[in-house]
Amino acid sequence: MTPTPTATLVARDWAEIQERMLVPLYEAVYDRLEVGPGDRLLGLDCGAGLALLLAAARGAAATGVEADPARRALARERLLEVLAAPPSASPPPRPYDALLAFSPAPGALASALPAVRRGGAVVLADWGPAERCTVPSVLGGGPAPGDLDAVVERAGLRPDGSGRVFCPFGYADVDSAVRGLLSTGLYDGASDAALAEKELAEALHPFERSDGAVWLPNIFRYVIARVA
């Protein structure tokens, strides 16, 4: 499937503006797991692949899964191995040591788990406490944090720790902030895209600094579980 021009622009906004906002989360998880040479990682909903690049920089072999053709194309431009769907072999010839499922759909998580070795790590992440996250309030009260512990329990995984990471969303100006936040897909359900963009810009003005930059502090929570 060839990405539409609009989808390509949105994907580039994600890759060039928004994706880096989650680097502190990725690095904290990799430190916690002691990711390094010889480790094999599978990243669900990997976007343009920045998390995979950071793992590769530590010596790990990282493979991504991304359903969106435009984001998948950008990840492949970075010379990354990115699949359109989780590996179909169950289990694959060489199981993965860790599954990075920072914000997957339930079905995607279930379909990817057989590819992870017994005792392998599964990482989930979501927004932290509402009072510590600016972005959900800017977006009109959502998205609300999910119950990661319940996801772990439903998936039959063994809890193995959690943590919180400060991930501020910083932008050069309101226009960049609007483009970055829209690229997350959080406004995809809006019936009037132009109105949604206007309302988002207005909601961001209280967070605009004297130099025009926009600063949105957030806390993310991650959970590490193990495959039984």
Image (spheres, rainbow, N blue to C red):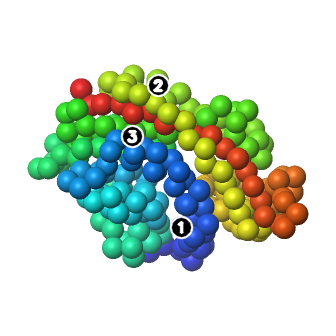
Q: Tag 2, which secondary structure?
A: helix
How far apart in space, not on screen, are marks 2 and 1 (Cα)? 29 Å
Mark 3 or 2 closer to N-term?
A: 3
Residue under the point 66% across and 44% down: 218
- The percent coordinates of residue 112 (x first, y second) are 30, 43
**Pointer 2 local density, CA inside 10 Å: few below 14, some 14–19, many at least 20:** some
Q: Which mark is residue 144?
A: none
Q: Amino acid at mark 2?
A: Asp
Q: For residue 178, which quarter of the picture?
A: bottom right
Q: Tag 3, which secondary structure?
A: helix
- The percent coordinates of residue 169 (x first, y second) are 67, 54
Q: Amino acid at mark 3?
A: Arg
**Pointer 1 local density, CA inside 10 Å: few below 14, some 14–19, many at least 20:** many
Give the residue number, with chain letter if any, for mark 2.
149
Residue under the point 30% across and 31% down: 226
Mark 1 or 3 closer to N-term?
A: 1
How far apart in space, not on screen, are marks 3 and 2 (Cα)? 18 Å
Residue depth check, mark 3 versus mark 2: number of the one nearer the observer: 3
Give the residue number, with chain letter if any, for mark 3.
32
Q: Tag 1, which secondary structure?
A: helix
Quarter of the image containing the N terminus? bottom left
Give the residue number, with chain letter if any, for mark 1.
15
Residue under the point 87% across and 52% down: 206
Q: How many marks?
A: 3
Residue under the point 60% across and 61% down: 18
Q: Amino acid at mark 1?
A: Ala
Q: Taking 41 as reference, is 92 left or right?
A: left
